Amino acid sequence: MVGTADRNTEVAGVEGGVGLTALMVAAARAIETHRRDSLARDVYAEHFVLAAPAAAGWPVRIQQVPDGDANPLWGRFARYFGLRTRVLDDFLLRSVHAGARQVVLLGAGLDSRAFRLDWPAGCVIFEMDREGVLAFKHDVLDGLSAVPKAARVCVPIDLRADWVAALTDAGFDAAAPSVWLAEGLLFYLPSIAETSLIDTVDRLSARGSALAFEAKLERNLLDYRDSPIYTSTRNQIGIDLLDLFSREPRPDSAGELAGKGWSTSVHTPFDFTRWHGRGPLPESNDALAGNRWVFADKPRP
Ligand SMILES: C[S@@+](CC[C@H](N)C(=O)[O-])C[C@H]1O[C@@H](n2cnc3c(N)ncnc32)[C@H](O)[C@@H]1O
């Protein structure tokens, strides 16, 4: 049997394994971008999809999906990613306007925030992901002559290893406040790597820093194996998310941070659907039921 670690390293780029999930999220952002009531706009997202042979035939607009919003993958799940993008855009911008100037995107994938958000002067965006994913992203953005709206530093790394030296060698300053994002990342990592990542973020975070991450609380992920989201993702684009997720019991990362003095708040995505007036709402046999978005601040003295 292939373990999570092996599944993660099988394919280094976006053509398979966990890297392909970055393309799936890009397709969702492209669809969201073209909605009349879009929650987030990412004009780069469709270019990643169109450039990747692995995404051949994937939609970049909801009109290209025969059953439209009734499609669990390109309708409800894509809207989930649109909502997540918006909520975490808002978190990052709020955090930099509160003073942090270093932004670290952990498992950045095809996130184009460095290019599309209006960052205050002096911001630097560190993008950490595996080399093959960042290389694909570079090629596409380079082909578009895209210009980042802040200093941007790519840090190719496997986040299951020790990544402190890679980040500090890239110019990260642990003495200055920072804002961290782990969006759609932690559940792919072995439990011990998540614990170590959270501990590292704490160690590298000066007071005044902030972190947001996404977690899944289900005790047994397989309870939702037949949910519409997992089934359609498997059948329509060949991504078996449950095969990519770590099946180990998850650490209580929000609790860990609270124990280290961070103030934390934990939300369901549905809280934000209600806030924005659009997005996914709970349903039965719901693969999103255990998803939580956690926001943490390391208070100033
Ligand atoms: C679902 S994608 C999310 C990407 C991005 N955060 C977003 O929301 O668009 C998951 C990302 O995590 C990255 N990832 C997963 N395991 C990783 C690891 N061990 N080291 C570095 N990156 C990893 C994948 O390469 C992929 O880009």
Image (cartoon, helix red, strand yellow):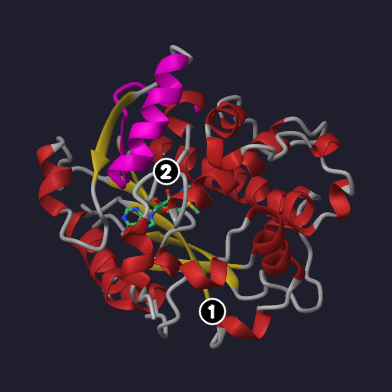
Measured from the top left, where is residue 59 in percent x and y?
72, 38
Q: Tell me which segment is drawn in magenta.
A: 117-143
Using the rendered image of the protein, determine whether residue 68 is visible from the camera's viewpoint.
yes
Measured from the top left, where is residue 183 in percent x and y?
47, 54
As shown in the figure, which amino acid type bears the numbered disc 1?
Answer: Leu
Residue mark closest to the camera, 2 vs 1 = 1
- Circle 1 packing at 10 Å, graded few (<14), some (14-19), many (20+), is some
As shown in the figure, which amino acid type bears the numbered disc 2?
Answer: Ser
Q: Is residue 203 above or below residue 140?
A: below
Mark 2 to mark 1 CA distance (whole Å):
26 Å
* Apparent side of residue 272 relative to residue 98 in the rendered image (left or right): right
Q: Secondary structure at mark 2?
A: helix
The residue identified by callout 1 is 217
Q: Residue at x 40, y 83 (%)?
A: 248
Q: Secondary structure at mark 1?
A: loop
The quarter of the rendered structure image containing the C terminus is bottom left
Measured from the top left, where is residue 246 in percent x and y?
42, 74
The residue identified by callout 2 is 95
